[in-house]
Image (cartoon, rainbow, N blue to C red):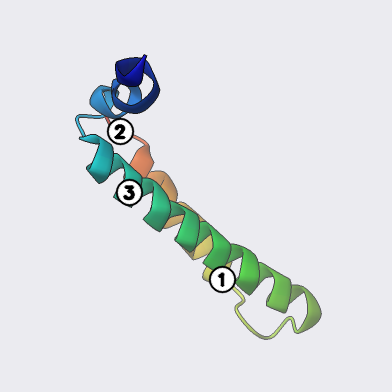
Amino acid sequence: MIQRIFLSHPATVDETFLQHMWFAMRFAALLFGAAGAALVHAFIPCLFEKTASRIITRLYGRIHNRGH
């Protein structure tokens, strides 16, 4: 059960549990940053014009070929 819950998925991308946790936490932090930039941009359009899309593009590049 422990194997399935905590270790199986990280192994599919050649990571340990802790490596995967760190990656996912950093990914989440960057998504929160992108969301914050988009929220500010919604109210003040001249701010953070490309920040959210730049972060999302970078994140996509990081996960696109993981585990291959």
Residue 51 point in image, percent of width and height: 53, 71
**Residue farthest to the front, as pictured:** 1
Image quarter of residue 20: top left
Amino acid, disc 2 = Asn
The circle drawn on residue 27 is none
Image quarter of residue 11: top left
Amino acid, disc 3 = Phe
Answer with left or right where residue 11 lies relative to residue 28.
left
Answer with left or right where residue 17 lies relative to residue 55.
left
- Check disc 3: other Cα within 10 Å, few if <14, some if 14-19, many if 20+: some
Q: Secondary structure at mark 3?
A: helix
The residue mark sitting in front, 3 or 1, is: 3
The residue lying toward the viewer, choosing from 15 and 51, is 15
Amino acid, disc 1 = Lys
Q: Quadrant of the N terminus?
A: top left
Answer with left or right where residue 41 lies relative to residue 55.
right
Q: Secondary structure at mark 2?
A: loop
Q: Which residue is mark 2?
A: 65
- Check disc 2: other Cα within 10 Å, few if <14, some if 14-19, many if 20+: few
What residue sits 56% from the left and 71% below the top? Answer: 50
The residue mark sitting in front, 2 or 1, is: 2
**Among numbered discs 2 and 1, the one appearing first in the sequence:** 1
What residue sits 21% from the left and 34% below the top? Answer: 15
Q: Which residue is mark 1?
A: 50
Marks counted in the figure total: 3
Q: Are marks 3 and 1 in contact (CB under 8 Å)?
A: no
What residue sits 28% from the left and 22% below the top? Answer: 12
